């Protein structure tokens, strides 16, 4: 319930403030679990992806966000669960797999943290592991404009256009090493930026 309310409020705000547009919605599966893999350049990216996608999404959030008990409870209510970055967090991977197997979509940012410089970072192998093990659709997404709307160090949001483009399902070769799979997914995300 809270997720739906916040999404509708965000839709209105994004359309008014950012002239928000979403493309490629036909590529989003109407039912069943899938992985939505996106670039990450701003704190606004998870919200932009959630506004663009009509399905109720699940997110991994860095463990540090869950230190405050009140904020932690809020995050759990809007489908965010913790992940330890810079390590193989098996409990987070298992939770991700559980949710996708239940038929729920999962948003992943393969680079892990935000890339303020606009350059692409190396993706973590975790997305390759999940893509290989789950055998579900992997949909690339490219968020544009959030790096201008809320750049690094900004104290206020700037009014600029924001868009999200969803691409065709990525074909996954399950025998590939996880890092190579992750790189393949990241390459598909970058291709949408053209």
Image: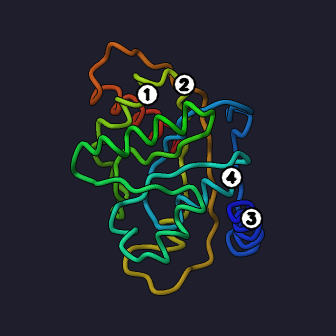
Q: Secondary structure at mark 2?
A: loop
Labels 4 and 2: the sequence-earlier one: 4
Labels 2 and 1: the sequence-earlier one: 1
Position of residue 81 relative to residue 108, above or below, is below
Q: Residue at x 34, y 48 (%)?
A: 111
Q: Is residue 139 left or right of residue 81?
A: right
**Residue picked out by circle 3:** 11
**Residue picked out by circle 2:** 136
Labels 3 and 4: the sequence-earlier one: 3
Q: Residue at x 61, y 28 (%)?
A: 168
Q: Residue at x 35, y 53 (%)?
A: 83
Q: Is residue 140 visible?
A: no
Q: Which mark is residue 52?
A: 4
- Which numbered mark, 3 or 1, is in the foreground of this view? 1
Q: Is residue 53 left or right of residue 88?
A: right
Q: Residue at x 39, y 69 (%)?
A: 65
Labels 1 and 4: the sequence-earlier one: 4
Specify the quadrant that holds the N terminus. Answer: bottom right
């Amino acid at each position: 319930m809270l997720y739906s309310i916040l999404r509708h409020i965000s839709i209105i705000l994004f359309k008014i403030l950012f002239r928000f547009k979403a493309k490629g919605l036909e590529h989003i599966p109407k039912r069943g679990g899938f992985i939505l893999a996106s670039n990450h350049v701003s704190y606004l990216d998870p919200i932009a992806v959630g506004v663009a996608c009509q399905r109720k999404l699940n997110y991994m959030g860095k463990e540090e966000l869950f230190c405050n008990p009140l904020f932690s409870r809020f995050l759990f209510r809007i489908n965010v669960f913790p992940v330890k970055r810079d390590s193989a967090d098996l409990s987070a991977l298992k939770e991700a797999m559980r949710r996708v197997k239940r038929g729920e979509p999962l948003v992943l940012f393969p680079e892990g943290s935000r890339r303020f410089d606009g350059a692409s970072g190396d993706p973590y192998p975790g997305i390759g592991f999940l893509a290989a093990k789950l055998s579900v659709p992997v949909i690339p997404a490219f968020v544009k404009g959030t790096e201008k709307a809320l750049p690094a160090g900004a104290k206020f949001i700037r009014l600029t256009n924001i868009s999200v483009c969803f691409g065709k399902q990525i074909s996954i070769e399950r025998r590939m090493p996880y890092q190579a799979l992750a790189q393949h997914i990241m390459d598909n995300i970058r291709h949408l930026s053209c």
